[in-house]
Amino acid sequence: MKTETSQQKSLPNWEELLQVAQQNTTAKWISRPGQTPATATISSYLHRLSPGEKPSVLLYRDTHGWCPFCERVWFALEEKQIPFETELIDLSNKPQWYKDMVPTALVPAVKIEGELVYESKDILLALEKKFDSFPLLPIASQERSVALDIIENFDSNGLVKSGYEFLRGKPFDSEKSTETIPEQIAEQLLNLQTTFETKLDQLEVALGQYPGAYFMGEFSLVDIMYTPALRRFAANLPVFRGYSLYNNGRFPRLNQWLTAINKRSAYQRVKPSPRTNNLIMHKLFGVQPIDHSKSLSVTQPQVHAEVESDKQDYAMEAAARLSSNYQTVIADIIKNSGIKKWVSKETLPSIESAIDGHLRRLVHCLIEGSIPLFSDKPVDSKTDQQNEEKGEPAADAAVGAIALAFLRNRVCVPRDMSAGAAVALETTIDEMLSSIY
Ligand SMILES: N[C@@H](CCC(=O)N[C@@H](CS)C(=O)NCC(=O)O)C(=O)O
């Protein structure tokens, strides 16, 4: 049986919180009870279909939303405002039917009116051919052929390869002959940096061919092709190489372009957060930060500069995603935050209850847009005796602080919520944590 304090009892219950938050956000997601992840972001335009009408596009993408190639297709579908269904493919355990269906067995793939298309570039071109809404290729034939040329040659232009080689600190083809002498390592790194910068110089020239921030003047598939890789470099390089693309005077057009992409409304619920990109690079690919004291959240100017009206939408999105998923979140906190060491049959109910209370308070704060004082009897460290008297609230606060701190860093974007919602969540957690003690 759970033991609720009087403070927790005065908070709205989960159903009430979910209802209010859901009514106040434009974000779209589905619940996937018992599956990982337990919620998933879906197309923003499904509501435009008539009742009973099936979307003409089915997108197969990776379960965690980490795949840069899936990101391209998802971005284009949102730009073109195409309603689509999503099927998540677990890349660590790909279903046999998927391997049988897609010759490469890679994601993304789509079915457009039942017809399979795979390879992100081919999917983008197929969508363009099939759907004339919000065209993403120039109309004028000369510009169109320039755009198609850039798209066609994307893989062979060497930019992405040179960027990843610089990031990992060694060429892809030299796994065995990796330098070990410090001077040689430094020289190799400098060479990799020079090669990457030369590629970026070429990119600056390409970005200057037409007026405006985008490659072709107007936003196009060319921008979509480049977005995932360039944004990942902008997030990863400061942490893993101490090298910044942002505010780098050598690449002013690239900076203008990164800012313009970051602001596109269709991208808001698709884009990963820099922190998520950095976690993947570190945990999945084993790249080490140059400075271990460095936060993985660094970079991305203007991440907090969302327009005021969106701020509330994002806060509500965070509140709604958390409310529709709270049981999984609580179980995850108990299992993975380290708190487990103190959990026994006797303590479990009060630990669960303390986490539940703090999460409901967090959601309540997101909805209300303000941080009420955490407690009318805040925990302090003045005297043991005082804290002894406040035994229960102090223990609650300790568990709550662990839960909030863990959750803050656990959120994966865009899998669990959008980048804007994650900023709202982080900000609110920080304020709550600062008022606990
Ligand atoms: N050239 C492909 C690349 C797709 C790709 O590499 N997808 C990765 C995920 S980021 C994948 O499916 N990996 C699973 C595997 O290798 O089994 C495209 O542009 O679509």
Image (spheres, helix red, strand yellow):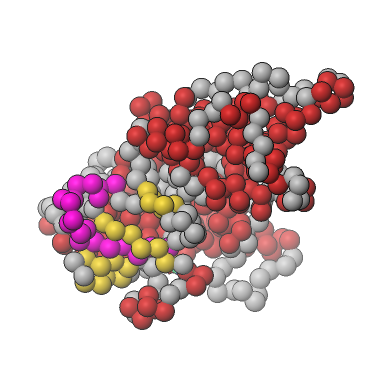
Residue 15 sits above or below residue 81 on the image: above
The residue positioned 73% from the left and 61% from the top of the image is 182
**Image quarter in which the N terminus is found:** top right
The residue positioned 12% from the left and 57% from the top of the image is 141
Viewer-side residue, 219 vs 153: 219
Viewer-side residue, 343 vs 60: 343
Q: Is residue 148 magenta?
A: no
Which quarter of the frame holds ligand 1? bottom left
**Image quarter in which the C terminus is found:** top right
Residue 93 sits above or below residue 187 on the image: below
Viewer-side residue, 361 vs 174: 361
Viewer-side residue, 19 vs 164: 19
Q: Is residue 60 magenta?
A: yes
Span shown in magenta: 44-62
Image quarter of residue 160:
bottom left
Image quarter of residue 187:
bottom right
